[in-house]
Image (cartoon, grey):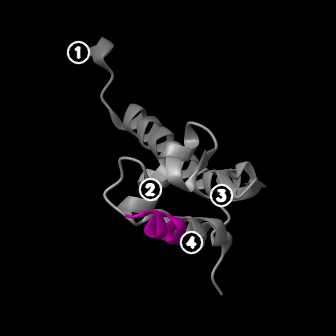
Amino acid sequence: MTTYHQEGLTALSDPTRRAIFERLADGPRSVADLAAGMPVSRPAVSQHLKVLKAAGLVVDRAAGSRRIYQVDPDGLAALRSYLDQFWKKALQGFKQHVEQTEQTAPNEETT
């Protein structure tokens, strides 16, 4: 079973999708806006947006004949929550290491 965060990580593993996602972090954009300055075509950008949308990282809305895409805060929150668990574990491990080091280090005042 593929989970929500795994789909997000897989979607962001592609450098072009990551670049598109990073552009969307600045605010909502159309496919044409996103494709401007990218080394890929508009249809390719649309395909990357389809993957990002399926992963729950972006949402879109109609604006006339265009689609406007933006980062999905719920999808980003789920991905961040997944990554935060590793940060918390790393901090706990660091704290434990420091405490153990302090207990086993010779007392500098007695030397």
- Distance between mark 4 and mark 2 Cα atoms: 11 Å
Label 4 secondary element:
helix
Residue at 64%, 66% (x, y): give it: 53
- Distance between mark 1 and mark 4 Cα atoms: 63 Å
Residue 75 in view, yes or no:
no
Nearest to viewer (mark 1 / mark 4): 4
Lower sequence index among marks 4 and 3? 4
Number of labels in the image equals 4
Q: Which residues are magenta?
A: 41-48
> Which residue has dot 3 on it?
58
Whether residues under marks 2 and 1 lie with C-beta atoms below 8 angstroms apart, the answer is no
Look at the image and tell me in which quarter the C terminus lies. Answer: top left
> Which residue has dot 4 on it?
51
- Residue 2 magenta-highlighted: no
- Distance between mark 1 and mark 3 Cα atoms: 61 Å
Q: Amino acid at mark 4?
A: Val
Q: Amino acid at mark 2?
A: Arg
Residue at 55%, 51% (x, y): give it: 89
Give whichever of 72, 5 is nearer the camera. Answer: 72
Nearest to viewer (mark 1 / mark 3): 3
Nearest to viewer (mark 2 / mark 1): 2
Residue 104 in view, yes or no:
yes
User: How far from the left and from the top, in percent, is residue 85?
Assistant: 60, 54
Q: Check residue 18 in the rendering and tell me which mark sits there, or answer none.
A: 2
Give whichever of 102, 66 is nearer the camera. Answer: 66
Seen in the picture, residue 85 relative to 4 is either above or below; the reply is: above
> Which residue has dot 1 on it?
111
Question: What type of secondary structure mainly makes up the magenta span?
Answer: helix
Whether residues under marks 4 and 3 lie with C-beta atoms below 8 angstroms apart, the answer is no
